Image (cartoon, coloured by chain):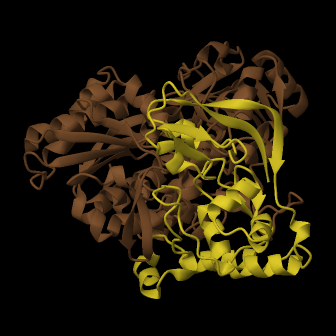
Chain colours: A yellow, B brown
Amino acid sequence: MKLITLVAKVDKEKCTGCKTCAKVCPTVAIEIVDRKAVINEELCRGCGNCNQRCPVYAVTMEKLEKPYKVSVAVEDVPYEKIDELCKKALLNPEQIICYCTATRAEEVAAAVLKGAKSPEELSQLTGVRTGCKVECIQPMLRLLEAHGVTPVPPEGGYQWYGRTPTIWDIPEEVKKKYSSRGFYFDEDIKLLNKVKDTRKEEK
Amino acid sequence: MLRKPITPQKPRVSQYGVDPKYVTKRVAEYPEITSVMLSDLFPDTPKVIYPSEKGIAAVREAAEKALENIDMSMIKPGDSVNVCASHHGFTLLGGEPYAELLRTVRDVIARKTGTDNIRLRAGVGLRFRETEEYIKAFKLDEHYKGKARGVAPVDEGIPIETEIGTLYGIKAIYDADWIVHVHNSDVREVHFHRQVDRAVKPFGMSYARIETRSTYHQNLGPRGANFTARSIFASEFVQSKFAFTAFLDMSPVGVVGVDADNDLYALNDRLTVAGCKYYGKIMTLLGQIDECIAALDFPCPVPYVFAAGVIYANFVGANVDLFDLEGDLPPYTWYTEAFYGKDGKPLIEGVPPVNPAIKMCVQNYGWGGYPSAFFSEHIPTIVVGREQAEVMNRDPQNIEYMSHAVIADNLDTAMAFAYKTTKTDKVIIFDGAAGGINVSESLAKFLIEKAPYVNKLVDEELLPKWLCQRGVDPEVLKNFK
């Protein structure tokens, strides 16, 4: 869930149509029309990536007169299914996966179960990856993959490239090689398994 | 031992904080504030080259000396070289020492190799234009002859094959024949990297794409996280481009020197020892504080403001030994934050609370640009000035920060409220004071009393344990200078 308070605005005089903004937009809200960036305000989640990467400073972030929330109702999906999907993605449904919006795995799982097919759709629906735009891409990809979805990155964009390894994927020989250097892989696996498997009511 | 307050670091013009004109009063200006030098607390506090009478020339001199014996023969005339830097260095002592190191590295490479195609590629944290601001402020673009640029984790990436699978780096970091890694040894985010492979961290962070950084903070766990950096650095691809490294050698009191090496792991081992020893002592001492008001007053995001070389995020976790790898979760790290449930309580047993000694936080001056709601949610926080509150409200990373904080019209009312409500007169100020720490007189006396105990505890018990946990033989301490 995210409260959307900002929207991107393009200064057409400054815009050179270089497409950088479109390539970094996590909600694919920007199109280049007649060599100028055009923002689809309905899809813009006010993350500011375009503002932060525009090489000619043509994008400003303006406050919305009427902020609005985007969220997916967890109640719309049977919780057993959410729980099952999160477990498959090695996440606890209650754990926060987007630190900027405090969005929890269960909401993103609900969005996936309701049919979201890509990180971009998840960002549009829940607001995840529209704060820092960095830290939550992997749990999003893990949840999609756990549901059997293989998303394709936006063509020519830099939004994301692929899922990366988790601690559970690290080969034994690699763990052995580095265990004396202060990396506590097996102990961390134990901790993350505990988080994944614990449910509040059980506690 | 009590001295007059040390001059705080000046506010900085930045899109991530308020205009300096709104910082009308500093916490260190109050009559009850004094300062303690770290050398008065710990007798083994190292001598520094900066700040010193020599000024910034001391950094250049140390850098030239350190680079003298570095093998640069792999770089041929006409080869392209990316000098890779990170935002963090510019937050140390006003930024000039790191900027001077970056200038010197360029000059020495040009002189020793004959190449002039030397570019500065400066990575960032979560404020994508931050190093652009530093490049401009320190005129690094001029020094690098128009070849300096800030790079961000959402910029075009490249896959890097590693021992654990594919990770992703920022293309512009690696688009040269050679890369030179220029960083600093300040421990900073111990809660994240746990002083394990500290020197390697930027390869998994400021030089890395979002996929890699998310791997660090979501996929690997609180003690395995920094392995992303090791994986990337150890990859064939990065090894084929890595020429050498140069570090601003930091201590909590300032710049100790410049260290350089063709072997990053060798340099890493050296700074592991120094980091545990010097930062370990002050962090352990701050962990002894029983109650206080924490005042933030520095040009950086909330978790990164400094007191005695220690960042606020580490003070928030100072009730736990962050260097001890037997402990899994620090009181603050993103893994910890993730593990708080909807009812505001931890999902599992054993999650340590944030430092209960911090009774209130007064944010006189601190930036947005880092997801900080965890801090205002867990620690009663007063933000000084509506302009500063507005900075947080406009920040997409801090939409909820002010939901948990209150606003004071000015610093006087904020401090009066904090004193009255917390009923403590102990104040610690995170204002980047160099060489020591600005605190209230009551806290100064407390620290002076506790320091001998901490000194002994770290030297005799904790430091040997910390080094063993990192594969370093404590015997090295016998010859440690």
What residue appears at the point 74 percent right and 76 percent down from the top-left corner? A86
Q: Nearer the viewer, residue B52 or B242?
A: B242
What residue appears at the point 44 percent right and 35 percent down from the top-left corner? B131
Residue B286 position (above or below residue B436): below
Which residue reaches farthest bottom?
A: A172
Q: Does the image show residue B458?
A: yes
Residue B416 position (above or below residue A108): above
What residue appears at the point 79 percent right and 48 percent down from the top-left corner? B356
> Which picture quadrant has residue B328?
bottom right
Q: Nearer the viewer, residue B471 or B414?
A: B414
Q: In the displayed structure, does residue B388 sit left or right of residue B223?
A: right
Q: Does the image show residue B457?
A: no
Residue B22's x, y, as percent?
67, 15
Which quarter shows the N terminus of chain B?
Answer: top right
Residue B192's x, y, as percent?
57, 57
The count of marks equals 0
> Which picture quadrant has residue A103?
bottom right
Q: In the displayed structure, does residue B352 sit left or right of residue B110?
A: right
Residue B316's x, y, as percent?
69, 47
Q: In the displayed structure, does residue A1 sit left or right of residue B48?
A: right
Q: Nearer the viewer, residue B3 or A163?
A: A163
Residue B154's x, y, as percent?
49, 50
Residue A159 position (above or below residue B162): above
